[in-house]
Amino acid sequence: MNFRLSAPWLMVLSSFLFATMGVCVKLASQQYSAGEIVFYRGCIGALFIAGIARWRGGTLRTSVPMMHTWRSLVGVSALVLWFYAIGKLPLATAITLNYMSSVWMALFLIGGAVLLGASRVDGRLIATVLVGFAGVALVLKPSVGSDQLIGALCGLVSGMLSALAYLQVTALGRVGEPEYRVVFYFSLGGLLAGGLLALSDSGFHGHTLTGALLLVATGLLATSAQILMTRAYAIGRVLTNASLQYLGIAWSFLFGVLVFHDPITGSALMGMGLIIAAGLAATLLRHKAAPDAPEPTDT
């Protein structure tokens, strides 16, 4: 794939596409199980990436199959749990729990630095992550009822696993794996895991025109967003990307108002301001840390 945008801009666009996908998943969950949605998302994504790779003359062969296997295992597990949480919880609550991934990521990086005997994580970037999550809480103000604890637990675990998956995406980028190949094997893992879950649950449901369109939209939006996100993590800074991911909450807030007619509150607007401030601060810190960093190269 040929992306000339910097990592921050890739994350902004990716967050918008992921937020749009979340709306489609929420609507599709009224007709399909989480396993089915993951299956169709993986199927569409794998076909889409295979077609692009063939058209561009790329190859899907990899020299690090175990890295892809581990990344797919963790990433697909996070995806299944998140889709399940979206179906069982209010959309705001499910998204908030999943966006805990950036906080988990910061904790993982800090813990790793401590174990290595050195503090190599910029404290200012960690602060932007925490400020962004404060904004998330203000925008969404999630609440979990006693009958939704399982869904809430799934959402929380999905956030932790997502943090691990993002770090693995960074590692794959560092060893030279192109983003389309990373997304292909992730989609393939989703196809296999989703199919097994669907068959072990209630099987596959019949389609309506609306349901089929939602599944196709979910697959295309998710795959496109995944490619952009993968590229951003391959060339950018982990915590900077984590901060910019919070923009997905701002997009989701707008979708909530426009699609689901959610009310606009002062605390929500304040939260959006914190989210945007965290994203801008992360971008500024990135340029200060590496002002002469080269532009992304063609993969």
Image (cartoon, rainbow, N blue to C red):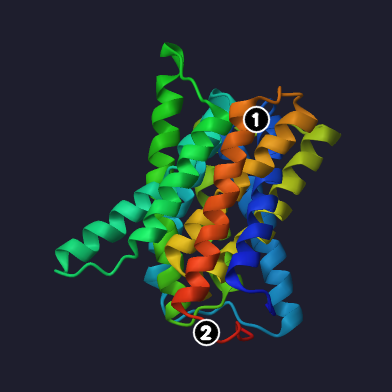
Q: Which mark is residue 293?
A: 2
Q: Position of residue 260 (x, y in %)?
A: 75, 26
**Would you identify the image quadrant in which residue 57 lies?**
bottom right
Above/below status of 4 relative to 135: below
In front: 24, or 77? Answer: 24
SS class of the residue under badge 1? loop
Residue 115 visible in this rendered orientation of the protein: yes
| Residue 290 numbered mark, or none | none
Q: Is residue 104 left or right of residue 217?
A: left
Q: Is residue 238 left or right of residue 252?
A: left
Residue 49 lies, with reference to residue 53, above or below; the image says above
Query: Relative to the observer, which residue lies in front, 200 or 86?
Result: 86
Q: Looking at the picture, does residue 99 appear above or below residue 128?
A: above
Amino acid type of disc 1? Ser
Mark 2 vs mark 1: give the one in front: 2
Residue drawn at (76%, 47%), measured in percent from left and top?
A: 217
Q: What's the residue at 22%, 57% (across, down)?
A: 111
Q: Residue at x 52, y 76 (%)?
A: 235
Residue depicted at x 67% and y 67% = 49
The percent coordinates of residue 25 (x first, y second) are 66, 37
Numbered mark located on residue 29 in the image: 1
Callout 1 environment at 10 Å: few (<14), some (14 to 19), or many (20+)? Answer: many
Q: Earlier in the sequence, mark 2 or mark 1?
A: 1
Q: Amino acid at mark 2?
A: Ala
